[in-house]
Amino acid sequence: MTWPRIALVRVVLAAPLLALPVAAQDPPPRGEAAAGVASLPRPTLVARALTAPIRLDGVLDEPAWQAEPTTGFIQAEPDEGLPATERTHVWVAHGDGNLYVAARLYDAQPDRLVVNDIRKDFDDRAQDAFAVILDTFRDRRNGYVFVTNPAGARADRQIANEGREINASWDAIWRVETARVDDGWTVEMEIPFRSIRSAAAGDVWGINFSRRIRRNNEIAFWAPVPRSYGLTRLSLAGTLTGLPGTRTAGRDLRFTPYALANTVRGTGGPSFDSELQGGFDLKWGLTRGLALDLTVNPDFAQVEADVQRVNLTQFSLFFPEKRRFFLENSGLFFVGDQARNTRGNLLPRVDEDLLPFFSRRIGLTEDGRTQPIHGGARLTGNATGFQLGAMAMRTGDVEGVPGSDLGVFRARRNLFRSSEIGGILMFRRATDGGGENFNRIYGGDTNIRFPREVDLSVYYLASDAKGPGGEEGVAPAPGDERGGHAVRASLGHDGNFLHFKLAFMEMSPDFQNDLGFSRRTGFRKYFVDWGIRPRFQFMRRLGVRETHPHLEWHYYDDLDGRMLAKWLHTGVTFFLNSGGNVQIQVDPTFERIDRPFILDRRIDPIPPGSYSWAPWSLTGGTDASRMFSFNWRGTLGELWSGTQKTLSLTMNFKPSHTFRASVGMTRTDATLELPDASFVRTLWTVRTNYSFNPDMFVDALVQYDPAHNVFNSNVRFNLIHAPLSDLFLVWNEQRITTGDGTPLGRSLTLKLTRMLSF
């Protein structure tokens, strides 16, 4: 399909929607235009000192909860600016070194509350939930989120830069109890001050509450937030006063040793090898705002295996960080663009052209082998008006690859109400290189928020390197020291109706970043992202809450002006009243290949040349709160020099809040204009989870790749036997299904951690 024809298709897709008059959209809420929600006065709440102790049982019978509550929740969805359809009363108190939050969530139909998960760090988007966010430094950017549901599940998250980074693996010591009552449900939370960092002085924090009523697909906030944002928009949060002048927050010492026993037999190996090992983590609150973390001989055996994916590109796939030590306070080390609202996704999209700091590179060689981590230290927090992050790690030798000392230092300073400026320094130095094998990256960045929700984001990075590395396929000369740069700038707007982003990026061929993730070097990129989100009355009556015609354009050329690649995504997404969605899209693509690469081992490599193709896709998902739900993606059209038919389908089954399962299948049938270039690639994935209670659960992940005759299983049992203390039992198995008698690869790991607090 030619590019002019693609342009015509885009017009055909978008024209019927753009031609509809603006008057056809839902009118603004009574007395307040939807765009004016963010300008409403910020509410204030006083935290009362306890006069009697709190018995944490979910029953609101203590004197503290008999005072006048705060109320007045305002919808963000579905009718922004209108009062919530159900009343919510909230109280906040303090005493005995704790912050207490209580809520009474009235519901006219309590038998229709949706609860389908009680796992630690459950996903609250598919069920009824109540959440509180605390801006403990009152900087309107960073905070802590605590979430529960009617079954008393716990989820906690650390927020940086108003949601640009959301760390769902952050854990705090806190308790919650809930109870169902005749007219709804109730909540009691106990959050120790020492569990969270906070400002050294002052009795004022930022605070906001959210409530999700899932049967209505409704979200409401105490301090109103436009529907284009969420609870993490701390610049719109309310104010909490009345906190005690002296608190024990930030002055704790936690020592968490672990003991591990495992037995392992590699696939095809003759016997099992067993070992015992141990290590520890230490967290020390140096000040109210600064925390020091030390780790010695860390182990990550309990981390869930990565989900396999079919790769139809010339680049490596991106897999996110999952290790707890690296996830905590990870937002401080982030350098990059402002996150665009992703309408329901918990985490912002990663810019795979360059993620300047990617902690998963620590402890992993270039060819994907695990490198032992001997130990490390991390200092994070706030001091003298700066947000600071520093990390140093040492890895050990692995066959053919020397160990390294690695480090990153990040400093950021707030500007005005919601802007910032910062700098970063990263390094890698081989422990046996004698100074001849190193990489340094340094630079600065700024994110500036203008009125009317316009953001400007800019960063500049430079690198110095000696030793292995450099431009792909070009070996550096012995002793050769080289340097390069990367720069990116973007201007964007994200509103209820219109969103757009314009960006430019350049990376020189010699830019080397051994602590980041990137797909290519030696390019310039031009980027456009545009879309509108009209809400039509007649569509809503048909079950469609919002329509989203949009496009993304990525254009790459080298530094001599030769086009390398371009990708144009054009689609229309329909967001349903139920919470489901459907999208139709077409993705014209051009790639110039200078060196052959292997798409599938059963066919010849893709030869150098220029390739154009334009596949069509239909994607979507049904209401995730139902017992049965489905997600799908079907792609039909060209692929490189041939054609493809790809189908991804996942069925989710949630009969209760204690058990859930999903079965997924991805199948690609491709034919390329090469000798013997037809192949079929299928991946099967099965997940199950059983939660005995909020502190004990078992997860299983089973994956089957018939093309490579590989069957992988990962089963993890987790018992939280004390606060921030776990017992893990992990079983891994790899089976080769060729029938040649290859012995199974198996491992069994028992790991015990115990947090000791001083």
Image (cartoon, rainbow, N blue to C red):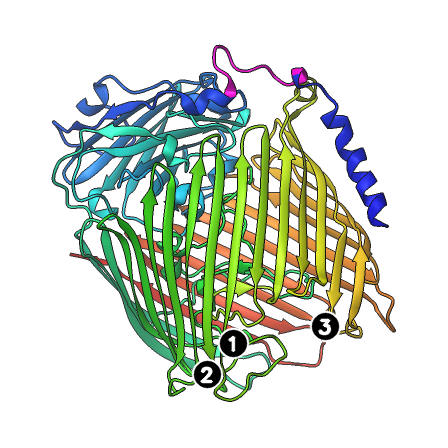
Please give the name of the residue rendered at 51% of the width and 51% of the height, measured from the top-left corner: 689
Left/right placement of residue 589 relative to residue 383 reads right
Q: Quadrant of the C terminus?
A: bottom left
Which mark identifies residue 369?
1
Query: Is the C-beta separation of discs 2 and 1 under 8 Å?
Result: yes
Q: x and y percent of residue 425 in the render?
A: 37, 64
For the record, the magenta segment spans: 23-34
Tag 3's secondary structure?
Answer: loop
Say which amino acid is labelled 2: Val
In the displayed orientation, state which residue is furthest to the front.
560
Residue pointed to by mark 2: 398
* SS assignment for the magenta stretch, majority: loop
* Distance Cα–Cα, label 2 vs label 1: 8 Å
Res. 295 image quadrant: bottom left
Along the viewing direction, whichever of 434 and 661 lies nearer the viewer? 434
Along the viewing direction, whichever of 517 and 209 lies nearer the viewer? 517
Dot placed on the residue nearer the N-terminal end, 3 or 2: 2
**Is residue 667 part of the magenta span, yes or no?**
no
**Is residue 30 part of the magenta span, yes or no?**
yes
Say which amino acid is labelled 3: Phe
Q: x and y percent of residue 613 in the render?
A: 80, 55
Residue pointed to by mark 3: 597
Tag 1's secondary structure?
Answer: loop
Please give the name of the residue rendered at 55% of the width and 28% of the height, measured from the top-left corner: 496
Say which amino acid is labelled 1: Arg
